[in-house]
Image: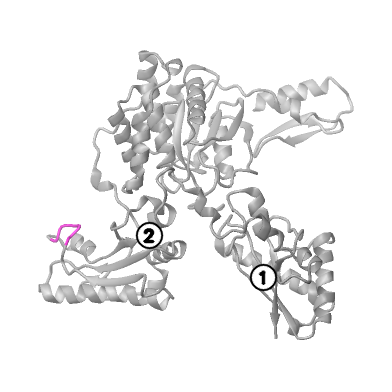
Amino acid sequence: MQAYSLLVLLLLATIAGTAQFDTVKVGLDSYIIADTSQPLNMDSLLAVEGKIDLNYQFYKERYGEEDLMYKITDNKGNGFDSLYGTRNMRPILHGAAYRGGANNYYHKTAKRKNQNPLPLDGLHGLCSEGFSKSVYLYRQNFEDYPTGDTCSCVDSSFNQLEYLQLDYYDSSHVYDMLKMTHDAATKEDVGPVYLHCWNGWHASGFISAVILKQFCGYSDWDAVNYWDLGTDGANTSPRYQTQRERVKDFEPYPEFLISDSLQSCLCPPMPEHIDSTQLHIEIEHLVIVPEAIPVNFQIVLYNVKFGSGRTTFPNISKNPDIINLKKALDADTNLVIEVGGYTDNSGSYSKNVTISQQRARFVYDHLIESGYSTDRISYKGYGPAKPIYSNRYKSTREGNRRIEIKILNKTVHTGNKLVDESVYDQNVKNEEELKQSFLSYFFNHPEENLGSVFIVDSLEFASGSFELPQGGKGIELLDQLILYVQKKKGLTIRVNGYTDSSGIEEKNVTISENRAKAVYDYLIAHGLTTEQLSYHGHGSENPIAPNRYKWGRDINRRIEIEFVAR
């Protein structure tokens, strides 16, 4: 990058002796030196293609790539600082193709929902590491996302990363991903490709298995076994059999075959030793990948720990496993569970059964007190049955004093895709319903028998802001609303604020309430009284348009006026 900046400086210095040189930002964290007194054609400047000279051996040594299951970054994004925005990042082909997820759910400073593309530091990290492309394998929340980054690379060259959205389920897109992988594998000046989903398990595992069949000669079953191992244990749902069959059905393209010598350089081995006991499901899987958990599966609450002979434990509401269990119950109203209590084998069998039942009842009572229906939750004590650790040692007996959650019923996802994106469209309004939901429609059709809740159309807040705009149609509608309420004696209104589903829900609730209060304050300042008004923030509740599209998220970020008779 330094050499590139110097070149720009020298070129500009020959143009005018009175030039005013300053730094100009051209990427997320990259700058050039330019004459700011003259017009600067950024498009032409950024059209300069990035050039890197980093081969497969460089990346293999830089990341310490041992085998196909070796993680450069772990499940929480740690392990390689400049790649923190990724998670579960693993090699597919040394220096040519890598797989993983996007570090959103666990990010320390830019935390947001799991169902999102790479965070910005993920894009920039890949760029600085010399990657030529990154591919997001799902569609959700990508419409208005950056399409790449420009940066200074680790070898001091100037690099450009292109960020694409391709569908792992579309055969033409799979072909495109194989082509870009082939380019990265066979062309010296093309950096690696990072193919990612949300967690780095399922969709990225599918395209990785296909790449291994294409470039490394994997058999059908070798590729399927690789897919299963790469899910970190989240592979037990019967619906994933569809993906296994797709892996087996893939036939390599003749135009992308590589030589045996190149294959020996690029293809990492499978792990020498595979310990299947390390693959397990935790309750957090039921929150972030509920489609991976089948009915009748039992999940151990590893963070719920009882002392010997104890039937309760302190601060149950703050226990991370209990918190995640509640999140799962909130997210899927069809989820029905059994809380199972277990003990070690110390003491009498009958006493252990009683203790295990009391432990299960303790968790059950807390869930019921938290507002969950008895129709969705039951409990049972199993005593010392089904130990998951040895009872010979005190240190391991503790793990047998546990709570397990058995899935009795849940939402059944379709078997067509890893992510059934249609679930994000539930309860949304159709075009005609939307048209009749706006406050302007209410004022233009007073004679119709309409509902009592209306959206203030064209009232738009800046991202993350709750400052009302200075004018526009939305403000005009609020002024019209003031006159309407003043004429209607006995009528009160509630101002309801909503956000889209992006970001952390706690922050969404705060933003929505602040926006509702801003409208409330405006109405008070212009003639209405506190007896006529109230306000409330609902966060991302009750979406009326699909959150997976930008236009839908724009509608969901709304202020609603609810008419309430005294």
Quarter where residue 118 is shown: top right
Q: Which of 381 and 309 is in front in this view?
A: 381
Kindly identify the residue that appears in the image at 18 percent across and 63 percent down: 397
Task: State which quarter of the image contains the N terminus.
Answer: top right
Kindly identify the residue that appears in the image at 32 percent across and 40 percent down: 228
Q: Mark 1 points at which residue?
A: 496
Q: Residues within 10 Å of mark 1 (few under 14, many from 20)?
A: many
The reply to whether residue 211 is in sight is yes
Question: Disc 1 vs disc 2: which is toward the camera?
Answer: 2
Give the number of marks.
2
Identify whether 233 is placed above or below 364: above
Is 390 magenta? The answer is yes
Identify whether 421 is placed above or below 467: above
Alpha-carbon span between mark 1 and mark 2? 31 Å
Is 196 magenta? The answer is no
The reply to whether residue 315 is in sight is no
The kind of residue on which mark 2 rests is Lys
The kind of residue on which mark 1 rests is Asn
Start-end of magenta stretch = 386-391
Mark 2 residue element: loop
Q: Position of residue 179 (x, y in %)?
A: 50, 23
Q: Residues within 10 Å of mark 2 (few under 14, many from 20)?
A: some
Quarter where residue 483 is shown: bottom right
Q: Mark 2 points at which residue?
A: 410
Q: Where is residue 136 in the image (x, y as percent from the top left)?
A: 53, 38
Mark 1 residue element: strand
Q: Main secondary structure of the magenta part?
A: loop
